[in-house]
């Protein structure tokens, strides 16, 4: 039995990689081409950035993505990579880009924004070491890193983020996530229920907060006796942030492989950038109505 559409499927997958690399190169223009004028200029930062993004898209390690590039020379030519770097080059790039990679998530406008948080597991130590072997000791090892995000519910794009290496209450990051955004509605779960958060949305953002009141929470008032309203229909948009978390963890991995906090941050932010790039490409296809038709597979049987 042979599958007639196998070649076209491979061609389609390769075309997707080309489009992804093209978008990543365009985004990389926002960072300096070289960090120093004394650089040997064998590889530029834009090429290294594409490698980092591909590594997250394919859920590979630094050694794994280098092996992938060696087996795909035509893809390397698409972003001008004439020589394949060693994996330590990518590791050093992680450390150098840690302070500027967050600037690449620069979408600042949306109609409805949803805020929520999730955790990513760390792989620096084994599960047995973190739980069983170390269960009776006084000190514990950190098991996950907390990520808080604000997303555009219409396009399901990530607008802003906050990463913490220790557990903190969700409300601490609420204002930081929203302070630079231009929005009309803000939705969040009961974990963000506070008078301060609602007044921040109303007075600072000039938007409408849709945060449900807890059972024993007092109703928040504006000037006079006007209660800040809660719209149930708009609040249902909040579930889309859970969808975003699910897609990121399923497609790009829920485990951070790096050991230091700085490189773990870069790895996690890279996942967010990859998600946004993939989402933009899919959204563009939807808008232009050029989304590919489902693959029709013809089976040829031989007697």
Image (tube, rainbow, N blue to C red):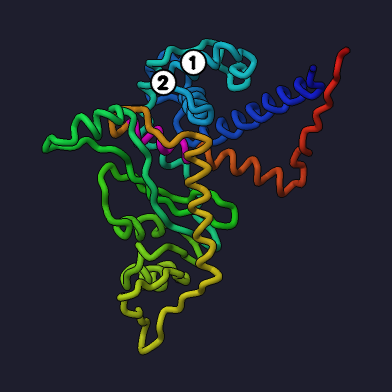
Q: Which residue is mark 1?
A: 66
Specify the farthest residue to the right: 303
Magenta stretch in the rendered image = 263-272
- Regarding residue 30, the answer to whether it shows in the image is yes
20 part of magenta stretch: no
* Residue nearest the viewer, comparing 209 with 251: 251
Q: Which residue is mark 2?
A: 90
Q: What's the residue at 71%, 43% (across, down)? A: 285
Judged by its main secondary structure, the magenta piece is helix
Q: Could you tell me which secondary element the residue under label 1 belongs to? A: helix
Specify the farthest residue to the front: 303
* Residue nearest the viewer, comparing 133 with 207: 133
Q: Could you tell me which secondary element the residue under label 2 belongs to? A: helix
Q: Position of residue 200 (x, y in %)?
A: 36, 69
Q: Height in image: 263 above or below 77? A: below
Q: What's the residue at 35%, 79% (across, down)? A: 220
- Regarding residue 46, the answer to whether it shows in the image is no
Q: Are marks 1 and 2 in contact (CB under 8 Å)?
A: yes
Q: Quadrant of the C terminus?
A: top right
Q: Position of residue 235 (x, y in %)?
A: 50, 67
From the viewer's perspective, is the residue at label 1 or at label 2 nearer?
Answer: 1
Q: Height in image: 200 above or below 119? A: below
Label 2 Cα crowd, 10 Å radius (few <14 / some 14-19 / many 20+): some
């Amino acid at each position: 039995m042979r599958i007639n559409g196998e070649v076209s499927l491979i061609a389609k997958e390769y075309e997707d990689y080309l489009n992804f690399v093209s978008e990543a190169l365009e985004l990389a223009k926002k960072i300096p081409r070289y960090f120093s004028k004394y650089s040997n200029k064998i590889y530029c930062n834009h090429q290294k950035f594409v490698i980092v993004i591909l590594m997250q898209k394919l859920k590979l390690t630094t050694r794994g993505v280098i092996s992938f590039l060696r087996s795909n020379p035509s893809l390397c030519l698409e972003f001008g990579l004439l020589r394949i770097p060693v994996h330590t080059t990518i590791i050093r790039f992680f450390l150098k880009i840690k302070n500027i990679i967050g600037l690449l998530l620069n979408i600042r406008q949306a109609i409805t924004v949803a805020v929520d948080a999730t955790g990513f597991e760390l792989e620096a130590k084994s599960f047995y070491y973190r739980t069983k072997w170390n269960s009776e000791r006084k000190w514990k090892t950190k098991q996950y890193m907390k990520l808080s995000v604000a997303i555009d519910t219409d396009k399901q794009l990530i607008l802003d983020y906050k990463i913490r290496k220790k557990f903190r209450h969700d409300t601490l990051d609420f204002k930081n996530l929203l302070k630079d955004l231009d929005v009309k509605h803000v939705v969040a779960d009961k974990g963000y229920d506070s008078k301060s958060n609602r007044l921040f949305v109303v007075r600072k953002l000039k938007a409408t907060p849709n945060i449900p009141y807890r059972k024993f929470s007092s109703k928040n008032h504006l000037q006079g006796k006007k209660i800040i309203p809660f719209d149930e229909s708009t609040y249902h948009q909040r579930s889309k942030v859970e969808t975003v978390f699910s897609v990121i963890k399923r497609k790009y991995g829920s485990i951070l492989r790096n050991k230091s906090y700085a490189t773990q941050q870069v790895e996690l932010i890279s996942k967010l950038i990859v998600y946004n790039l993939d989402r933009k490409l899919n959204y563009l296809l939807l808008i232009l109505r050029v989304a590919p038709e489902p693959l029709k597979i013809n089976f040829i049987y031989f007697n």
